[in-house]
Amino acid sequence: MCSRRTRPEALTLLELLVVMAIIAVLAGLLLPALTRAKLRAQQVVCVNNFKQLTAAWKLYADDHQGRLALSFYFFRGQVNTCAWVRGSMDDDVVVYPPVEAGVRDSTNRHGIEWGSFYAYARALGLYRCAGDSSAVEGRLRVRSYAMNGWMGGTWVKGQSNYVVFRREQDVVRPGPSRTWVFIDEHERSINDGWFAVDMEGRRGLLDAPAVRHGGAYGLSFADGHVEVWPLQDGRTLRWARLPIPNTPLNPDWARLAAATTSLK
């Protein structure tokens, strides 16, 4: 007896379209979850960076009779070689002398390694947020974080009636658990190592917090703990230029200023 050969069954066009539709639905369900998981992982890394940097900040004070690390690199026409980090992440605005002539500060690791802080936090990855993908000529920028400008820094012009914290023991108001030290700064705002806060709010947000953690940014506090604050005002989330307006009252400015310093 001879057997009849049967043709293998193939998917029809309709069946193929159904399969593709199912795959698209599954991808639509999974991708947001994967994106949230990635953001969460980046946030965890960022929080850990802040904890280690703040521990280094405290060690620095312990080794310098309670004096705080200096936050500003360039002030009143002079370079401060004792700043916690050197240089500026903003290569497009020529304000600060570069750390090394002819080398971009934004991708120059020496801006960190030659700062006063590096002896206490020697891993370069601690200075950059895992979610910060900003790059210059294909190279990631070396730093995403800035220090409270009133913490080992100086006052904003015309606001000398507010406390500049010089020593760890000065952090009394608002208090160590409510006064921030390091901030995750927006990649289009970050320049030198200090973050300026207008305490009177007339000019609004002089520098901008990052939005890379799902519209939120990280802050470390003088007692060592870390918080992630969601931004509430669309002007802060989608700013085009600095300063970010504070009229009507910007709740993001109000919350940050309240944790920055206080009147003398």
Image (spheres, helix red, strand yellow):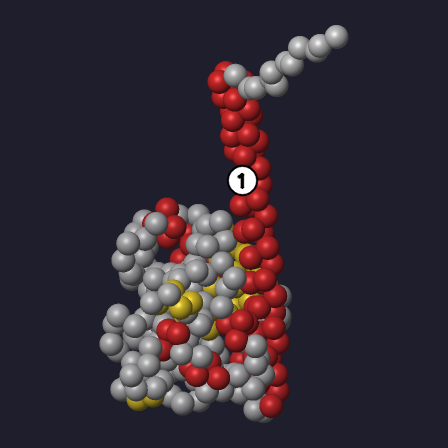
Residue 74 higher or lower than 245, as above or below:
below
For label 1, the crowd category at 10 Å Cα-Cα, with few meaning under 14, some 14 to 19 and many 20 or more, is few
The residue positioned farthest toward the front in the image shown = 1
Q: Position of residue 95 (x, y in %)?
A: 26, 78
Residue corresponding to mark 1: 32
The residue sitting at 30% across, 86% down in the picture is: 101
Three-letter amino acid code at the position of disc 1 = Pro
Residue 57 visible in the displayed image:
yes
Residue 16 higher or lower than 76, as above or below:
above
The residue sitting at 59% across, 55% down in the picture is: 41
**Residue 107 sits in which quadrant?**
bottom left
The quadrant of the image that shows the C terminus is: bottom left
* 237 to the left or right of 22: left
Q: Nearer the viewer, residue 12 or 175?
A: 12
**Residue 7 sits in which quadrant?**
top right
The residue sitting at 49% across, 68% down in the picture is: 128
Q: Nearer the viewer, residue 231 or 249?
A: 231
Q: Nearer the viewer, residue 228 or 166?
A: 228
Residue 202 visible in the displayed image:
no
The residue positioned farthest toward the right in the image shown = 1
Residue 230 higher or lower than 15, as above or below:
below
* 38 to the left or right of 109: right
The residue sitting at 27% across, 86% down in the picture is: 77
Q: How many marks?
A: 1
**Residue 211 sits in which quadrant?**
bottom left
Q: Position of residue 139 (x, y in %)?
A: 40, 68
Q: Position of residue 23 (x, y in %)?
A: 55, 30
The quadrant of the image that shows the N terminus is: top right
Q: Position of residue 251 (x, y in %)?
A: 42, 52
Say what secondary structure mark 1 lies in: helix
